[in-house]
Amino acid sequence: MKDQASRLRQMVNGIGSETSVGAVHPFHRSQSRCRVLAVTSGKGGVGKTNVAVNLAIALSRKGLRVLLMDADLGLANVDVILGMIPQYNLMHVLQGLKTLPEIVIDGPEKLKLIAAGSGGIQDLANLNEIQREDLLQGLAEIQNESDVVVIDTGAGLHRNVLAFALAADEAIIVTTPEPTAMMDAYGMIKVIHLERKDPLIRLIVNMAGSAAEAEEAGKKLVLLAKRFLDLDVEYVGYIPRDMAMVRAVKEQRPVLMSQPTSPAAQSLLRLAESLWLAGPRPETEKKQMGQFFRRVTHLFGGRSYGR
C-alpha cells in the first residue's frame, strides 16, 4: 500500500456564516487552488455517502463550485442518493469509450457529478501513457473549474479506499458512536498515519443520539490518535440520528433537499461551513492544483512515502 500511495503523492505538479436554508452566501475564495476532500470510513453502514453528498450540496449553496466524485467503483451509489441515472460513468473513461469531460453531468444545486459505475479500479493500472495523459487532460479541465472536489471513497481498509484517502488534501472520516465503528475509524486513522507523514484528518460522528454522545465518541478517537500515534485529529462535529435522513434515502433525495429544516440537514450545513472555514494547511495551499488526480491515475506501483 505504501508503494501505491507514494505513487499517488509523488506524481507531477501540474493540473493544475450560516444562512437560511437555500440562501447563497459565498465563502471568501482565498484559496489559490482547488481543495480535494476525501470522505471515507473504516466500515460500511455509517452513512458515509450520505454525508459526502450533503456536504457537497451545502458547499455549493455557499457559492462554491463543487465537483462530487464517486470513487467507490463496484458499490457506487452517489447517483442513487441523488435520484440520477447517469448514462456514462468513470468506467467508460477507463475503458477508453468516453473522455472525462463527456461523463461529467449536472446534478442538483449546481453540483457537477462524476459517477463511478461498477467495475474494478484496477483498470487504472492498465492505462498506457497516452490513455493516462488523455485522462489527466480531462481532469485538468474539470478541476480548473472547481473550488472544491468532494470524493466519496469506498468503505474499509482496502488499498483502493486508502489510495484515494491518501491522495486527497484532507481525509474526512465518518463514524458512528458504536464501539465497532469507532475502532474501525481508529484503524483507518492509524493506517493513513502510517502511510503518510503528518496527514490532515478530520472526524465527523454520524447518527449520534445527542451532542454529548457525539462529543464523547469524538474525544475518545482524538485522544487515542494523540496518545498512541502522536497525531492530531480534529473533531469537527456531528449529525444527529434523524428519521428525516432515513426518509430522504428512501425518496432518493439528499436530506438537504427533502427535509431542509430537519436537525440532520441543519447539522450538515454547520459542518460544511466549519470544514471549509477551517481551511487547508498553508503548505497545502502552495501545491499545484492537479496533483490529486495525477496521483490517482498512478494508483498502482511506485515507491514508499518515506517518513
Image (tube, rainbow, N blue to C red):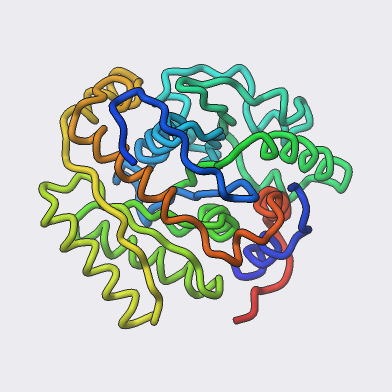
Where does the image place residue 188, in percent across and percent down from the top left?
41, 63
In which quadrant of the rendered image does the C terminus lie?
bottom right
User: In percent of the image, x 74 and y 35: which residue is there?
Assistant: 141
Q: Specify whether 31 is left or right of 95.
A: left
In which quadrant of the rendered image does the N terminus lie?
bottom right
Task: Reply above or below: 11 against 277.
Answer: below
User: In percent of the image, x 30 and y 42: which residue is there?
Assistant: 270
Where does the image place residue 284, in percent across and percent down from the top left?
60, 62
Residue in the foreground of this view, choosing between 303 and 279: 279
Where does the image place residue 157, in percent across and percent down from the top left?
45, 59
Where does the image place residue 79, in percent across and percent down from the top left?
47, 25
User: In percent of the image, x 62 and y 27: which residue is there?
Assistant: 89
Residue, far right: 130
Q: Specify whether 247 is left or right of 268.
A: left
Residue in the foreground of this view, choosing between 249 and 118: 249
Count of marks, rendered view: 0
Residue in the foreground of this view, choosing between 43 and 137: 137
Task: Reply above or below: 282 against 25.
Answer: below
User: In percent of the image, x 50 and y 68: which residue is there?
Assistant: 199
Q: Specify whether 300 is left or right of 277.
A: right
